[in-house]
Amino acid sequence: MRVVLWLVAVGLMATVAPVHADGIASNVDPKVTAIMTYLDLPMNQRIIGNLRQANQQMNAVMAQVVKKISPTAAPIDIAFSDKDIEDFKVSLAKLIYDTFTLDEINALNRFYSSPEGKSVGDKMPEMQKGVAVLQAQMLAKIRDKISAQLHGNVAAK
């Protein structure tokens, strides 16, 4: 049902349409139905669920940057709100709609529903954790560069 609301929010589904008991309008564009299936795949649910975890890591790095730059400054909170997550879901549904054809979305659904696709999907959390570590390392490099440049500018004055 959540996906239906996302798609209504982006205007991909008629808002005045007969609705079945499962919450899906009877005259829904087949592409919208395929997107709903795709977004409900376990792999995509994990991706959406891991978004907050990655944001928490970025928030921690930002806190370190601020502390290094100005130890007395108040921390900058870049945590995602529930609305931010819902906006992400809406944007993702629209991006999929605008990017892929119905045949391509159906092919993705077939692949990720196959044994090989399920295996790939099961490995994605570990892959995402590895990518998050790499991203944190890159952000730490940026933090250190910013700090070095700011300290160099402060020392020069």
Image (cartoon, rainbow, N blue to C red):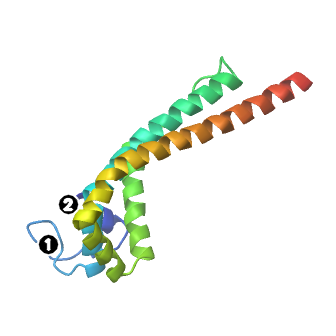
Q: Is residue 145 visible?
A: yes
Residue corresponding to mark 2: 1
Q: Quadrant of the N terminus?
A: bottom left
Mark nearer the N terminus (1 vs 2):
2
| Image spot of residue 61 (x, y percent) | 56, 32
Q: Is residue 76 visible?
A: no
Task: Using a 10 Å C-alpha cutoff, classify the residue at mark 1 as few (fewer than 14 neighbours), some (14 to 19) or many (20 or more).
Answer: few
Q: Secondary structure at mark 1?
A: loop
| Image spot of residue 87 (x, y percent) | 41, 55
| Image spot of residue 49 (x, y percent) | 33, 46
Q: Residue at x 33, y 81 (%)?
A: 102
Location of residue 115 (image quadrant): bottom left
Residue corresponding to mark 1: 19
Q: Secondary structure at mark 2?
A: loop
Q: Is residue 53 left or right of residue 72?
A: left
Q: Is residue 22 left or right of residue 98?
A: left
**Amino acid type of the residue tagged 1 in the rendering:** Val
